[in-house]
Amino acid sequence: MQVTAAPDHGARTGWFGLRRPEFSAQLLNLLIATYLLATCNATYWGKLVEIFGDRPVAMVTLALAVWALFMLVVSLLAVGWLQKPMLAFLVVLAAVTSFYQDKLGVIIDREMIQNALTTTVNEGKHLITPNFLLHVLLRAVPGLVLVFWPRVRRRSFLRGTLAWVLTCSAAAAMVVGLLFTDLKGFSTSLRGRKDLIGSTQPLAPLGGAIRYARMLQKSAKIVTQPFGRDATKGPRLAAAGKPVLMVIVAGETGRAQNWALGGYGRDTNPELAKRDILYFSNVTSCGTATATSLPCMFSHLTREDYSYEAGLSYENLLDVLSHAGVHVEWWDNNTGDKDIANRVTSHMMTKEDDAAACAEGECIDAVFLPRLAKVAETMTEDTVIVLHQIGSHGPSYWLRYPKDQEVFKPACHSPELATCAPEEIVNAYDNTIRYTDRFLSQVIDMLAGQDRVIPAMFYVSDHGESLGEGGLYLHGAPWFMAPDFQTHVPMVIWTPPAFRNAMGLDQACIGARKDQPASHDNMFATILGLMDIKTEVRDDALDLTAGCKGQES
């Protein structure tokens, strides 16, 4: 009996016995590139129409160039046995990042990649919402079916390599050729609207990840250089008679536009308004996200000079204070110190510090108060303590204040900001500002009531926040396109009479500068000035107290 082998249907059929199509590797890449551009780039298409809507030929030409760029990138990455895993990765990546781009207006650049990789689980979990999951599923599942359902017809190594080279060359030539049809016009438009290409998914996050990896590679070789080792206590600090306690509150996501002290129409600062403070109304942040602004604030570098690598290259404000013989501690209720406190005592706040302040699972800023009170009652040396707030961190604004402090109603109680009415988002955010007002006032009152120390407080927010204006939410927009809502921040200095007398400060003189332009650039020198720290690295031009001190005895 002659035995005949059964036909191999398994290789050509899949679920439910359906026949699987067979594609070349190049065709599969083309289909996925087209799918990504078509389904995960609503923001890109909107910006393209906005910029080139009155020039349809240019719009179509640029759209084809971007499609060819997608094809080039996909072809370069999805090669050989890595093809399907890489295509699947690109589909999932684009599905995820397109949610934040399309729904929140967040551009996924290098800084945003850095923020995402340095955040905490508590912070990140609020961004995983039902709408996020639905958005990802609707885009990822069809894309993954398109990746894994077809069979790929493999050629010999030589023919496959030749086809890959020709495909990449043709895509590159198409990009260049199309752009050269109006190079001057396209270059002018793209320079003026960098957010157009910056909104393409997954090209933008891929580019950001590559730049972040290069930044980490360069920074791994950096050895922090000594800075301000000549720092000493000035004669006033040395002769103060009591321990001096300076509390620096590093604010989080507080935008100046919503501070009543700066002219906002709502009473968001009822407590600070009753206290003898100086509110600086015209302050600009160093960046639009914590990962940039926080280390920049504590660096001697200005915003123009600051970079991640440059910041790591030098000791910072906390180190200079330590060199002067001041005890320094960093307390954190946020996402960590971003390497600022590497050489000083640091502490992450938990429910062990105050169970009531952490009753909802995440600690509100009241968690600092018991520990601060204990230090003020027991300290015996000049001390600077940094309190890194959770402040107004979104999108879960309603978790940043106690339930009984919800003054402005109705407030958004969902991390899905786009599902809340604009007034609900503003109400929730304003409640966080009002609670920061209460918290800062509690710090001031606690310090003022402690007569065994000479206290002071310096507060400034790290960056601002967008609440839906122009379709933007949260923060982290690239500096070139960041609205004032993300860069205009509040700053407060409180120096009671005992501190002013000890340091020879003229309150009226400093107050005369409170409406003049200032920035995070001023913080390094101003803290040293307030504390009477003598060092060659203090730049008097950036010290807001310069020229506002009496003669030293």
Image (cartoon, helix red, strand yellow):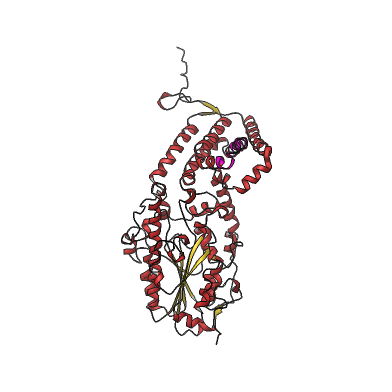
Q: Determine whether, in the image, residue 228 is placed left or right of residue 262.
A: right
Task: Give the image location of residue 408, x and y in percent.
Answer: 35, 58
Quadrant that contains the C terminus:
bottom right
Highlighted range, magenta: 48-72
Of residues 329 and 47, the one nearer the viewer is 47
**Which residue occupies the extreme bottom position in the image?**
553
In the rendered image, residue 50 lying in the magenta stretch gets the answer yes
> In this image, 428 relative to 294: left or right?
left
Residue in the image at 39% along x and 77% along y = 448
* Picture coordinates of residue 500, whole percent (x, y): 48, 80
Where is residue 459 drawn, in percent x and y?
A: 46, 68
Q: Nearer the viewer, residue 38 or 244?
A: 38
Give the quadrant of the N terminus.
Answer: top left
- Compared with 234, 266 (above or below) is above
Residue 316 in sight = no
Looking at the image, is 194 positioned above or below residue 57?
below
The answer to which quarter of the image holds residue 77 is top right
Q: Is residue 199 visible?
A: yes
- In-front residue for pair 278/242: 278
Does the stretch in magenta take in 170?
no
115 sits left or right of 174 in the view: left
Residue 141 image offset from top left, x and y in percent: 44, 36
Our reading of the magenta stretch's main secondary structure is: helix
Residue at 34% over, 66% down: 354
Judging depth in this view, the residue of 117 and 299 nearest the camera is: 299
